[in-house]
Amino acid sequence: QPRGAGRTLREPCLWPRSICDTSVLAGLYGPAEAKISKELPDRAALEVLLRPKVGLPGVLERSREQLLRQTCEAVVLGVLHPRTAISLVLQVLSDAGSVSFPLWDGSGGWGTQSCPTAPSCWTPRSERKVLMSTTKGSCSVEEMQQCLAAAQRAATTIFQFYRDSVRRRYSKS
Amino acid sequence: MMESKQLVQVGCYLMPFEGKIDFIEQYFFSSGSITTADGSALVKLGNTTVICGVKAELAAPAVDSANKGYIVPNVELPSLCAERFRSGPPGEEAQAASQFIADVIENSQMIVKEDLCIANGKLAWVLYCDIICLDYDGNLLDASVFALLAALKNVQLPLVTINEETGSSEVNLKQKNPLTIRKHPVATSFAIFDDTLLIVDPTAEEEDLATGTVTIVTDEEGRLCSVHKPGGSPLTGAKLQDCITRAITRHKEVKKLIDKVIKSITPK
């Protein structure tokens, strides 16, 4: 049981990725009481902390934190918990590239990634819209379209996986 | 004392906005305004003013990449540029912008780090690209990438030779060469309103009210160097494609403007 917050909504979950051996441990705390300086009157203040495998977090971590925070803000119904704080703590356990994907998976989202020039695109639920996108290296417009299509296909598979696992879990009891 | 090679260019560019209204972007662009830097540029996009100075220093290359120089971009958002920024260590936005600029340099390969190497394993150039925002009114990334590109195109590096007998480096300040810029990345940002409306060149107020932003960086061949969408409202694939098409169109206009200014200040 992680301490320091009122309660945990989720158990910290670990998603080992067999494809590229990147794994991230995620812990979510809150909604808990927020510091007055951080408190927002109309919604919950979301905070993402990303710890690298070794050393102290730097500019790269800060930029990824911003990416994840803004993505989570779009998904989490923060208006249901005004004046509270939700903090998401992520610890990189092993990094073999595309860290942001398991990060997102670990934080309970739905992510897909296609690999040629490594753009990661995240598409939410049934609409298959692009929620978040980041690219590494350059690619042509056609390649980008292919990546988006691959991300959308993979999102379908992952949603099905979530659906199946939830069904399995609740059908037993 | 170096002669001041300053030139001011005001560019106007029409951008169709949601197919109905023509949106006018105004540029103000001056190159070589900091005489103590090796290259500099001041860019004004709407009310956002960004200045970029490039300082070149000599250093030994890293052991694991002996044939590479360094490029160190840094974005500063001092408290003078807008009320929202505090003085002190760089905040999240400044750090994220610095990382974005570093990613753009790496992804687009605008400067190949091998070009900065003078003697393998011994001597290489370090380019400190300091981007300082003087007036913040949204669209920081567009202005920063523009200023960085313009400043790098303005850089004149002195010729450095290594004396084989003594092994020391000799800097010839009389003979200066420009940097090899291989690609010209240009960033175009859009603010998303209500999941459907897209606005180019958002102001700070528009950014605050928007539900998300997208920044697309393209090079002159129409390749995408970065599609940066940090969360916010989800976009359909078609809308994203629309943004990409607009970004490619805008690239041509910005490139034309940079070329015009650079051409007019190059000594004949």
Image (tube, helix red, strand yellow):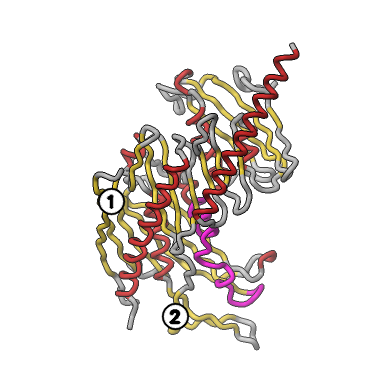
- Mark 1 Cα-neighbour bin, 10 Å: few <14, some 14–19, many ≥20: some
Seen as rendered, the residue at the extreme top is A173
Q: Amino acid at mark 1?
A: Gly
Seen as rendered, the residue at the extreme bottom is B165
Residue B81: tell me if it is visible: no
Q: Image quadrant for the N terminus of chain A?
A: top right
Instruction: Identify the residue shown where x is 37% and y is 36%.
Output: B196
Q: Amino acid at mark 2?
A: Lys
Would you place residue B221 above or below residue B190 in this image?
below
Marks 2 and 1 sit apart, C-alpha to C-alpha, by: 34 Å
Tags 2 and 1 in contact by the CB under 8 Å rule?
no
The circle on residue B46 is 1
Q: Is residue B162 magenta?
A: no
Q: In the rendering, at what x and y percent does residue B37 appear?
A: 41, 68
Residue closer to the observer: A113 or B239: B239
Residue B238: tell me if it is visible: yes
Instruction: Identify the residue shown where x is 61% and y is 20%.
Output: A9
- Mark 2 Cα-neighbour bin, 10 Å: few <14, some 14–19, many ≥20: few
Q: Which residues are magenta?
A: B99-122
